[in-house]
Amino acid sequence: MKSIRVIILIWLAWAFIVIGFQSWITARLVPQWPDHAQEWTTRETGPKYQKDQPHLLEPFMNEQVAWDSEYYLAIAVGGYDDPATDLVGPPDNQVTKSYAFFPLYPLLIRVFSLPLRLIGMNPIATATLAGVIVSALGALMGMLALYDLTRDSLGEEGALRAVFYLIIFPTAFFMVQVYTEGLFVGLSFMCLAILKRENWVAAAIFSVCATLTRAVGVALVIPMSLIWLRRGEWMDLEWRQILLQGIGLRLLTRGLLAISPFIAFLIWKFSYLGIAFDYIEANYFGRGFLSLGFAFSDWSDAFRSIFTGSHPQHTAYYITEFIGLAIGIVACMATLKTHPELAWFSLAVVLISWGSGPAQGMHRYVLTAPAVFVALAAWGKDPVFDRAWTIISALWMSSLAALFALNLWVA
């Protein structure tokens, strides 16, 4: 109980510190536009880039919203067809860009907004506060789950170190913004923690919710199937026992629960939401689920541009992308023997994120790979590594949190 209390207090302090820092930085600094991180950001960033995006103009907690936050708030306030967001497609069949985003996070924002309406704020301000609360609670759930996942292997001190490394990771500030990182980390890490106890129903519920938060949640089918197959209780039984004693039904049920994230993904994929998602992602966001050829070409171009880039912002941005990718892959390899389920899930997260679109956001996507924090916590037994990584993470996160608050491109 003492460790749980410590984690909760650290979480509270972290959330207030990040939000407070972002408020301070916007009061202290005025950026020089445009942002040259990528070619398209040079065209689309500026002092008034949000003028046609009403969901990003609300002053209340404005430092916690930018870019994709517009769509989460739009869905929460007005639904997927909210006319205040961009309409795209042929004139006779237009849809909003909101369809490129999964439904659970904005749905929870809407649910949490209901009691917050009593405060008397306007709908967008209320939804913004609700979004930050949902994200922060998800982060807390992820912290508690990561502690549970690592306590046996790393000990009490190591588990607390893994939790601390999670919230100071360079992109961890996203877990207290109107973005899905906090909720997804909470749902996916909790699913993995519950799997340790083989509570299949609860694990399946968390895995389905994670899949309805972000597409990469489907990768939870890997650790769930591995654990189900590793038990191998069906291998020690004769077919007569399975058929006559009703054991087969139980085994089948567990098998279906093990693949529940994949089933949920397929149901969503062939629904109207999924079809619209594919259309918007492919035509307007340049992403697609495992578009390997495009991804390899774009990442190759990004690597070459580091050495030939015409602007330091561009070079600096892509360096962070490749550092994020390297951290994810090395951590997965380092934990493959000690934490195979976490490692395989994390590797799937890294590879799906890498192979589904252009070279952007990787340092944010690896935040959802638990093997990263298991590996870092193990390396952190060395006091030199612990202090050095803490300094690097804190400085890096403060820089990225400032860029986000100032409406510059982060990920």
Image (tube, helix red, strand yellow):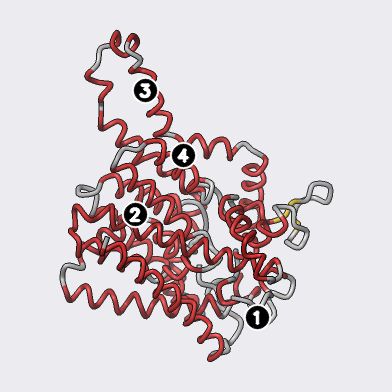
Residue tagged 2: 145
Q: Quick check: marks 2 and 1 in contact, CB under 8 Å?
A: no
Label 2: which secondary element: helix
**Real-space Cα separation, disc 3 to disc 4, in angstroms:** 19 Å
Of tags 4 and 2, the one toward the viewer is: 2
* Quadrant of the frame with the N terminus: bottom left
- Closer to the chain start, of discs 3 and 2, is 2
Residue tagged 4: 261
Asked whether the viewer can see residue 87, the reply is yes
Of tags 1 and 3, the one toward the viewer is: 3
Residue tagged 1: 46
Q: Is residue 334 above or below residue 61?
A: above
**Real-space Cα separation, disc 3 to disc 2, in angstroms:** 27 Å
Amino acid, disc 2: Ala
- How packed is label 4: few (under 14 Cα within 10 Å), some, or many (20 or more)? many
Label 4: which secondary element: helix
- Closer to the chain start, of discs 2 and 1, is 1
What percent of the width, then of the height, locates residue 119? 65, 70
Asked whether the viewer can see residue 290, the reply is no
**Real-space Cα separation, disc 2 to disc 1, in angstroms:** 40 Å
Q: Is residue 387 above or below residue 224?
A: below
Amino acid, disc 4: Pro
**Real-space Cα separation, disc 1 to disc 4, in angstroms:** 40 Å
Q: Specify the quadrant of the image occupied by residue 388.
A: bottom left
Identify which residue is drawn at 19% across, 52% down: 152
